[in-house]
Every structure is written in structure tokens, then in C-alpha cells.
Image (spheres, rainbow, N blue to C red):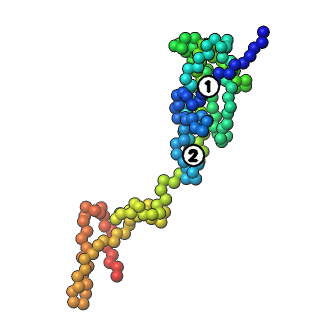
Amino acid sequence: MSTKEIGLPVYLSQGTYVNTEYKNGKLQLKEVTADSSGNPAYQQSGTWESPVIAIGDLVTAFERVVKNLSTSGSKATYKIYTKSSQNNSTWSDYVEINYDDSSINSPVGLYAKIKIEFFTTPSPTMFTLDDFTDGKYDSDYIDSSNGLLRLRRNSNLPTDTSVYGNGVLFVTHIQSSKYRKIYSLRIKN
């Protein structure tokens, strides 16, 4: 009697995604944002769980998980788990596969599920929140130009001028509710 392996397709485009996504034909950690250089930043960990796979009586045992894997970056890792059931109601616990030969350690059953956990180690990334060069936050109290965000230390207040004979009188109204403390008043020509 000869033994023949029968492949049962597992569709990564179906299932339950937690911080993962199916993108461009691949299962991956979910992209969260992009860094200042435009490189994608991903979730730190996530899982994918397959829908129920009906083994039926096509095979006597669900023996192996065959994987086609590519990881971008050496800090990405994964773990593959399986569980089985005889009646699609009572399930065994998830058990990690044997990575040497991809053999399954779950008990033989008529139904199976696969779970993949993804992990990555955070790497230093540059994020620019704002470059503060266009002055969009400028107000009477804030200066947001020249690449800095800072409180204004000097305020130019509007003045009313009146000419009296040989001199000029400058009048400025300062509302005490707008300032906590005035350190000095200086008049410039």
C-alpha cells in the first residue's frame, strides 16, 4: 500500500485577523503608518486564524503544514499552531507545529484550524510630527516658524499715536487677563 499526500488549500484571504492583514497576496502584520522617509511601520504583533478546515474522510490524518514564507527584515518571527476536532464543536487546544518537518502535533480529527502569530522587534524610526516652518501655529503668544515651536517672549502691542506740539504720545492698552506677568516694558523707535 502506498501513501500519497493530498494538499488541502488554506486561504489566507479568509479568516480572523488581529493586527494582521492580507495584502498583495501575503499575510502580514498590519501597516499602522509610514515613517518620515515613507517606509511602512507595522503593528508589533498580531495573529491570523483560519476558518474551519473540513478534513472529512479525504485523509486519515492531517499531518503537515506546508508554508511559503518570506520575512522582510531579520527581526520578524512567527509561530504556527493547529487544533483539531472530531465534531466541529469540541476542539483540542492549539499546539505549535514541529518546524523541522512541519509536522502537526494536534490529535487526528475531521476538522482543523490553523493559527499564525507574528512578532517583530521595534527598530528605531524617525517620525516627524510637524516641521514648524510655515508659521501655521503663529499667534500673539506662539511662534511656530524657523523650525521651532516656542512661546513668544516679546510681544509687539498695537499703539495709538497722538502728536502734541513737538512730541508724539504712544498709548497702549494692556489687558491683565491676557498676561500672567510683565517683566519689563520697552519702547523702541
Residue 122 sits above or below residue 89 on the image: below
Question: Is residue 75 shown above or below 5?
Answer: below
The residue located at (57%, 14%) in the rendering is 85
Quadrant including the N terminus: top right
Toward the viewer: 141 or 5? 5
- Image spot of residue 51 (x, y percent): 55, 23
Q: In front here: 153 or 162?
A: 162
Residue receiving disc 2: 40
Q: Secondary structure at mark 1?
A: loop
Q: Which mark is residue 10?
A: 1
Alpha carbons under labels 2 and 1: distance apart: 27 Å
In-image side of 182 versus 82 (left or right): left
Residue 54's image quarter? top right
Q: Are marks 2 and 1 in contact (CB under 8 Å)?
A: no
Q: Quadrant of the C terminus?
A: bottom left
How far across and how far down the image is residue 138, in percent?
A: 39, 63
Left or right of 130? Residue 69 is right
Query: Above or below — where is 131 with respect to 66?
Result: below
Say which residue appears at 33% left-offset and 75% top-offset: 186
Q: What residue do we see at 60% from left, 23% from top?
A: 114
Q: Sequence-wise, which precedes: disc 2 or disc 1?
A: 1
Q: Residues within 10 Å of mark 1 (few under 14, many from 20)?
A: some
Determine the residue positioned at 65% across, 21% down. Answer: 8
Residue 151 in view in this figure: no
Q: Amino acid at mark 2?
A: Pro
Find residue 17 and report its horizontal and vertical position in percent: 53, 31
Q: Which residue appears farthest toward the left when viewing the image?
A: 164
Q: Secondary structure at mark 2?
A: strand
Q: Position of residue 14 (x, y in %)?
A: 55, 28
Which disc is residue 94 wearing? none
Q: Amino acid at mark 1?
A: Val
Toward the top, the furthest residue is 1
